[in-house]
Image (cartoon, grey):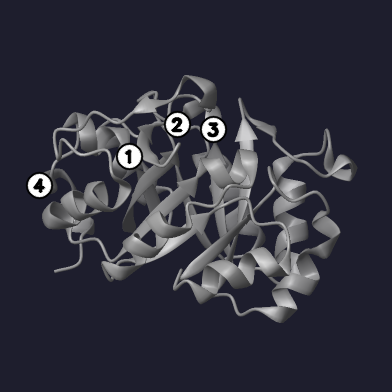
């Protein structure tokens, strides 16, 4: 299982995400760095963990279509492979991010207004360039596409896999930053039974080394972690077995 640090960007700075209540997000306070500049926060994490991949959520782009272009470009220049959720809805959005050097662009259930386009996206790009995020809040599917309102997360997972996606993120926004444990592990296992070869990343609510071990035991390929790193609840020693030498 790969450890994937998360950096949330709002108003151009790194913020602490809590329970998906974005209007209440505040500048990050971290034991790793005094900076709130996203690239500096990422460098501080890398100095300790040496993780090859980082997940970036550009909330300015997701909520207001204001891509933090310069900030993301600076993060790309560090050499860390970036998975970026910037609320991409169109081929133009995807191309913009890939041309900037982003390794993998997130298409999400929260942002995409027409999930019927997913098969076209999957045919246009290889599985290393795109990843689909199944977004939840309190266990309920979070979707922009009216056709999927009220449907189940496992039904969406099945549809996305049938469209050709081979990499998925499963994230319950209500758990993010709470330290209450990862509520999506059972769903991830259900998705694994649907398609054993799909790469599955999850997180949200990670609070301890035991929680990380539970995620590994559940068969996750990647684990998203943010608050527990900055609070010091997880250390390099806690994560050593999952970090690349």
Residue 170 horizontal/vertical position (percent): 56, 47
How far apart are the alpha carbons under marks 4 and 2?
23 Å
Is the C-beta separation of discs 2 and 1 under 8 Å? Answer: yes
Q: Residue at x 28, y 44 (%)?
A: 37
How far apart are the alpha carbons under marks 1 and 3?
13 Å
Dividing the image into 4 quarters, which one contains the N terminus?
Answer: bottom left
How far apart are the alpha carbons under marks 2 and 1?
9 Å
Residue 104 horizontal/vertical position (percent): 50, 67
Is the C-beta separation of discs 1 and 3 under 8 Å? Answer: no
Find disc 3 in the rendering and name its residue.
173
- Residue 152 location, quadrant: top right
The relative height of residue 43 versus residue 244 in the rendered view (above or below) is: above
Residue 226: image tag: 1
Left or right: 120 as drawn, with respect to 208: right
Please tell me whether mark 4 or mark 2 is closer to you in this view: 2
Find disc 2 in the rendering and name its residue.
176
Q: Secondary structure at mark 4?
A: helix
Looking at marks 1 and 4 on the same chain, the residue that comes earlier in the sequence is marked by: 1
Looking at marks 4 and 3 on the same chain, the residue that comes earlier in the sequence is marked by: 3
Query: Crowdedness of circle 2 by 10 Å Cα count: few (<14), some, many (20+)?
Result: many
Q: Secondary structure at mark 2?
A: loop
Query: Crowdedness of circle 1 by 10 Å Cα count: few (<14), some, many (20+)?
Result: many
Looking at marks 1 and 3 on the same chain, the residue that comes earlier in the sequence is marked by: 3
């Amino acid at each position: 299982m790969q450890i994937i640090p998360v950096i949330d960007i709002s108003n151009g700075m790194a913020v602490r995400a809590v329970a998906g209540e974005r209007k209440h997000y505040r500048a990050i306070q971290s034991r790793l760095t005094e900076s709130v500049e996203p690239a500096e926060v990422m460098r501080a994490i890398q100095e300790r963990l040496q993780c090859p991949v980082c997940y970036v959520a550009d909330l300015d782009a997701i909520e207001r279509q204001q891509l933090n272009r310069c900030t993301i470009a600076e993060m790309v220049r560090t050499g860390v492979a970036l998975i970026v959720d910037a609320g991409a809805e169109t081929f133009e959005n995807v191309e913009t991010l890939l041309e900037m050097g982003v390794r993998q662009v997130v298409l999400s259930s929260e942002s995409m207004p027409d999930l019927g386009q997913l098969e076209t996206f999957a045919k246009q790009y290889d599985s290393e360039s795109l990843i689909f995020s199944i977004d939840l809040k309190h266990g309920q599917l979070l979707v922009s596409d009216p056709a999927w309102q009220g449907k189940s997360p496992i039904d969406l997972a099945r549809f996305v896999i049938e469209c050709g996606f081979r990499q998925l993120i499963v994230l319950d926004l209500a758990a993010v930053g709470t330290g209450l444990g990862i509520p999506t592990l059972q769903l991830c296992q259900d998705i694994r039974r649907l398609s054993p070869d799909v790469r599955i990343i999850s997180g949200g609510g990670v609070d301890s080394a035991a929680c990380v071990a539970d995620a590994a035991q559940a068969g996750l390929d990647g684990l998203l972690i943010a608050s527990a790193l900055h609070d010091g609840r997880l250390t390099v020693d806690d994560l050593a077995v999952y970090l690349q030498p």
